[in-house]
Image (tube, rainbow, N blue to C red):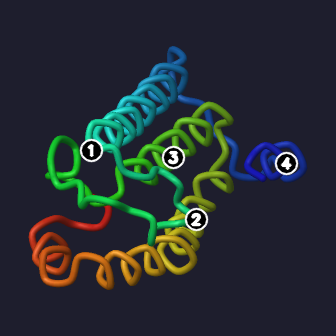
Amino acid sequence: MMLALSELIPFGSFTLPANIHLWLSACSVLAGIVVMAAGVSAFGKSETTINPLKPEEATSLVVSSIYTRTRNPMYLGFLSILTGMALFLGSVLALCLLPFFVLYMNLFQIIPEEEALTKLFGDQYNNYCRDVRRWI
């Protein structure tokens, strides 16, 4: 969608001096990959499901590693990668899509996951949610 918007509606395109947007976009994508990999690795070490469509199959609550900073490092990583793509495209309209990604993920993925994890882990999960933010 970002590519389509930047191609079809070039209004709001931008460039930064000396190809800074290339460095910023590469750093954002790389940071996203690192954050996602840390989340996947922590799930692997805990031997619990990584399938976001079946949170009720979780066998343990992962609260270490990257999960001490964010409850959703994989979604945060996706957001960072999308931010890098929007910067690479140099499109204000692409950047404007990012809040919609966050809203969509909150409503249709994260909240249902949180409900399932609350049923599975009760107060342990509620305490974790109190101490660690959903995104950052």
Query: What residue is disc 1 on?
Result: 46
Which numbered dot is residue 78? 3
Q: Tell me the SS state at disc 3.
A: helix
Which mark is on residue 4? 4
Q: Name which residue lies at 57% across and 37% down.
A: 87
Per the model, the C-alpha gap separating discs 3 and 1 is 22 Å
Q: Is residue 5 left or right of residue 27?
A: right
Give the residue type that dot 3 points to. Answer: Phe
Number of marks in picture: 4
How far from the left and from the top, in percent, is residue 75? 46, 54
**Which of 75 and 101 lies nearest the eye of the viewer?**
75
Which of label 1 and label 4 is nearer to you? Answer: 1
Amino acid type at mark 4: Ala
Disc 2 target residue: 53
Furthest residue in direction right, as rendered: 8
Name the N-terminal-most of marks 2 and 1: 1
Residue 33 horizontal/vertical position (percent): 45, 31
Q: Are marks 2 and 1 in contact (CB under 8 Å)?
A: no
Which numbered marker is on residue 1?
none
Q: Residue at x 68, y 56 (%)?
A: 93
- Quadrant in the picture for residue 7: top right
- N-terminal of the two: label 1 or label 4? 4
Q: Earlier in the sequence, mark 3 or mark 4?
A: 4
Compared with 67, 117 (above or below) is below
Q: Nearer the viewer, residue 55 or 3?
A: 55
- Please determine whether, in this image, residue 46 is positioned above or below residue 109: above
Q: Earlier in the sequence, mark 3 or mark 1?
A: 1
